[in-house]
């Protein structure tokens, strides 16, 4: 958790060539507008306004990059991609941003993993499925990891939470290969549900050697990331 608390703003970019070309591992947070992406990032970093949530969903049209690790020698980046799904910008802007996000997910060389934020009450929407199409080839080769975070889990009872997990698992099943590293977890920023597991997962993506002992001792608790069957 302390590693995630080190997050600080680095830069903002409207084009991929404005992002730093370095070799540091990168973790991308993506999701529909109003799915709770900014809230999850702020909870992870224990900062109220590290990731800015626009009062008008869909207005934020930049990739915001945050540095993680020691201040003088960061060891990873966290990329906050624009939310999608609201008709508050022109069609031209939507097409342009779809291209930028598709290119980012398809070719960003140092991308280690994608955290897809999904409202647990809605499950994967067609727009989420469309976004997954961009990165699925890299997920299925094991090059990029995927964690689906079902947000606002406190709005559901236990039975509904389990049903939400099962529904998303079924939707993702067709995308999973033997090489894929795909997981899910229930998350609530207000209740801190799944917060420690989210922090441990993203840390492990860029520090795999540090988490192998913990992985062997992992339990099958419902709040922990769920690996999908191959």
Image (cartoon, rainbow, N blue to C red):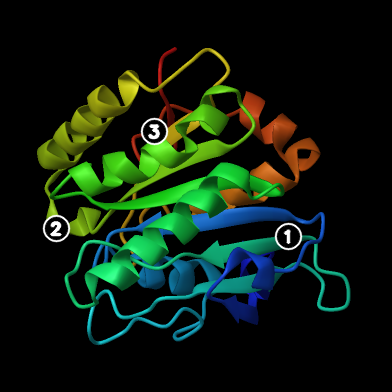
Q: Are marks 1 and 2 in contact (CB under 8 Å)?
A: no
Few, some or many C-alpha atoms within 10 Å of disc 1 (few <14, some 14-19, many ≥20)?
Answer: many
Look at mark 1 in the image and give the residue it sits on.
76
Residue name at image x 56 percent, y 36 percent: 145
Task: State the CA–CA distance, disc 1 to disc 2.
Answer: 32 Å
**Disc nearer the start of the sequence (3/1):** 1
Instruction: Locate the C terminus and report the quarter of the image it occupies.
Output: top left
- Which numbered circle lies on residue 220? none
Residue 68 appears at what percent x and percent y? 70, 67
Where 63 sits versus 100, above or below?
below
User: Which residue of the protein is positioned furthest toward the front in this rendering?
Assistant: 92
Residue at 45% over, 86% down: 49
**Would you name the residue on which mark 2 appears?**
155
When asked about the image quadrant of residue 155, the answer is: bottom left
Q: Are marks 3 and 1 in contact (CB under 8 Å)?
A: no
Out of 69 and 24, give the one closest to the viewer.
24
N-term mark: 1 or 2? 1
Taking the image as shown, residue 131 lies to the left or right of residue 103, namely left
Q: Is residue 40 left or right of residue 7?
A: left
In the depicted structure, whether residue 27 falls above or below residue 162:
below
Secondary structure state at the residue bearing disc 3: loop
Q: Around disc 2, counting alpha carbons within 10 Å, would you say few (fewer than 14), some (14 to 19), or many (20 or more)?
A: few
């Amino acid at each position: 958790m302390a590693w995630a608390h080190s997050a600080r703003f680095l830069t903002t970019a409207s084009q991929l060539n404005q992002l730093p070309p370095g070799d540091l591992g990168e973790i991308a947070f993506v999701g529909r507008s109003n799915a709770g992406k900014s809230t999850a990032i702020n909870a992870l970093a224990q900062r109220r306004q590290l990731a800015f949530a626009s009062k008008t969903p869909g207005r934020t049209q930049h990739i915001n990059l945050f540095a993680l690790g020691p201040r003088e020698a960061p060891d990873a980046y966290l990329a906050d991609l624009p939310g999608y799904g609201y008709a508050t910008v022109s069609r031209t802007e939507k097409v342009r941003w779809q291209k930028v996000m598709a290119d980012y997910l398809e070719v960003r060389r140092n991308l280690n993993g994608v955290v897809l934020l999904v409202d647990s009450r809605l499950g994967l929407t067609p727009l989420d499925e469309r976004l997954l199409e961009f990165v699925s080839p890299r997920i299925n080769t094991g090059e990029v990891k995927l964690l689906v975070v079902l947000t606002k889990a406190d709005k559901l009872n236990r039975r509904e939470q389990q049903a939400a997990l099962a529904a998303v698992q079924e939707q993702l099943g067709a995308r999973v290969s033997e090489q894929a590293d795909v997981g899910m977890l229930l998350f609530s920023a207000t209740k801190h549900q799944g917060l420690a597991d989210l922090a441990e997962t993203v840390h492990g993506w860029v520090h795999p050697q540090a988490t192998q002992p913990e992985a062997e001792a992992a339990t099958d608790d419902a709040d922990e990331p769920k690996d999908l069957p191959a």
